[in-house]
Amino acid sequence: MILYIGASIYHILCFSLHKLIYHPEEEAVLIICDNIFSKSGMEELKADIDKSEIFSRTLILHYIEGAYSNPYVLKETSPAEEIDRYIAWNEQWIEEWMEQNQLDISEAAEFNTAIDHRHFGLYLLSKKIPYQYFEDGNGLLSRERVQMEFHKKSQYASYAVTKRLHALGNSRYVTKRYANSSAQVPGFYDEKMEDFNVITLFAGLKEEDKKRLLKMFHAKKLELPRTKKGPVLYLTRYVRYLQKPTIQNHHYLSAMILDLFAEDHLVVIKPHPRDFSGRYRDLFPDAVVLDKHFPSELLPFLYDGKFRKIITIGSTAIDALEKNTEEIIKLEEGFENKLDSVFGYVAAVQAVKSLFPELKKEEITAAGCLREVLDPLCRDILGFTVPEAGKQGHYKVVVADEIPDRIPEADLILYLNTAGDFKFADTDPGVFQRLAFLGVSVKTVSRKSLGKASEAVILAEAGDPEIRKAAENFRFRKEFPRTGLVMTAGNETREEKEYGKVMAEILWMSHKTGKENGMLLLPKRRRKVSMGDVEAVRQLCSVLKKEEETDENHRICTNEIEE
């Protein structure tokens, strides 16, 4: 008997391929967790697997019951003895479950699992039973830190036992590690790794076996209408895996991704298996929403064309689909954490295009920017991605966000300053005399808007007064129809721009003082200002400069009444 233990439809695909290729004539038992779909969905999945007759027996392990029945609740302060008691209880629970289901693992000639940090997989590990490990998703074998951070945040017990017993395939009891070698971090090497690319393996199956698998997963041929720009595939992420795991954030995140990177494209959405497909049909009625029950890795065998882009914020399937698209947009945690900062990025790239319409790739660079946002925007707007800074001494444009040790010299430097620390002035306080002010305003268009109103500022440094004037005169407007937002840039009056530049210098001084003395109350940027207001903040700025020159401690506390 061959034993397989998994917890996702991707695992089931891997095990099905492994069984058909390596053990076509042997009996095999598949154990799957009950958290892949709902209760009724799990019953349907089991029935579909049984009908395929790939495995001689399919058992559903009630993981949620086992996980929450464990009396030992692990946390960061739990000692090793407490973790060992947690593991011992899991052993007892699994043995009782095997007895109830009449499963005798002494009959197994080979053990395969994709989860050795929970339930049955953890049982193999803690009992020191040799097993073959399948990576949890494409490319994850070389990205252990990503998995560890996720477990630490969402389920600490898994993190604790992984650290204690060297799970995630790191135990000495692992005899082989199956992983998609092409999806790993460049340069990754593991002497126990064996390449397991499900797309390549599926393509090599007999036709009848291909049909069996496609039928088991309810995977049907995909026909899409021809469009000028080509279709964009969006692979969603389960809401629980997000940094902010709420339905509202999930909706906003998905809508923003499509507004940013799929404008005027036919959108195809492949929901995560634990998502609700109907939600996407309600949110995006113009999109093609696929069935959630099949692994995304089967898409090359369902769609004969090529996607213009494939976008995701967490699906590992994207690493296996590189050959099926012209462009991969792989968004990570940084995108979600800086979601409201994307408007500044959009405005900055549009400003570059407007101010330097003939700009060449080698004439621009970036410093401290969120690349997963900047790169796809530049591909769409400028026609190329912005290269890393080279050895050349001077550029036409630099786009800067989190300030590194050194910013290359340029005719124009666009400071996004999303952290609000104004660090670009730390080494050159005189920079404020060379700045143009570019406000970015976001407003909702209706009560149904998924996002909220916000404001940001881009500060553009230019030594040439003509470039500085052109930056201040830049205007831009963009609608985000799926999020229900509209963004404008550069619409401030002359007084508002002057007021903003002076306030930027004041806030920089305030930030420095707050950082050193622990005292900081930042004022909001004021709107609808007069020249009298400008003169008032100029006088305040002058006073603060004098205080700084005499090295006096001061505290900034500005309370404004918005008009």
Image (cartoon, rainbow, N blue to C red):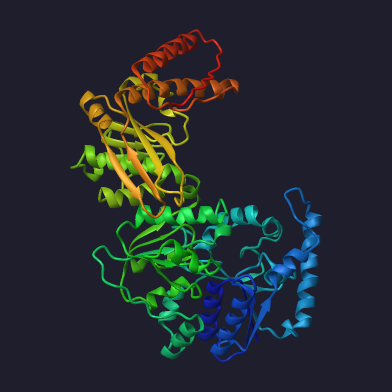
**Left or right of 392 on screen, residue 514:** right
Q: Nearer the viewer, residue 310 or 54?
A: 310
Q: Give the x, y percent position of residue 221.
A: 38, 80
Q: Nearer the viewer, residue 96 or 481?
A: 481
Note whether residue 546 is visible. Answer: yes
Corner quadrant of residue 27: bottom right
Q: Give the x, y percent position of residue 132.
A: 61, 73
Residue 399 in the image: above or below residue 56: above
Q: Give the x, y percent position of residue 485.
A: 39, 47
Q: Nearer the viewer, residue 138 or 416?
A: 416
**Left or right of 447 on screen, residue 400:** left
Note whether residue 53 is visible. Answer: no
Q: In percent of the image, x 42 and y 36: which residue is there?
A: 455
Q: In percent of the image, x 21 and y 44: which residue is there?
A: 360
Rendered-image quadrant of the C terminus: top left
Rendered-image quadrant of the N terminus: bottom right
Q: Give the x, y percent position of residue 365.
A: 31, 40
Residue 430 in the image: above or below residue 420: above
Q: Nearer the viewer, residue 464 or 5?
A: 464
Corner quadrant of residue 429: top left
Counting the numbered discs, the total is 0
Outermost residue on the left side: it is 358
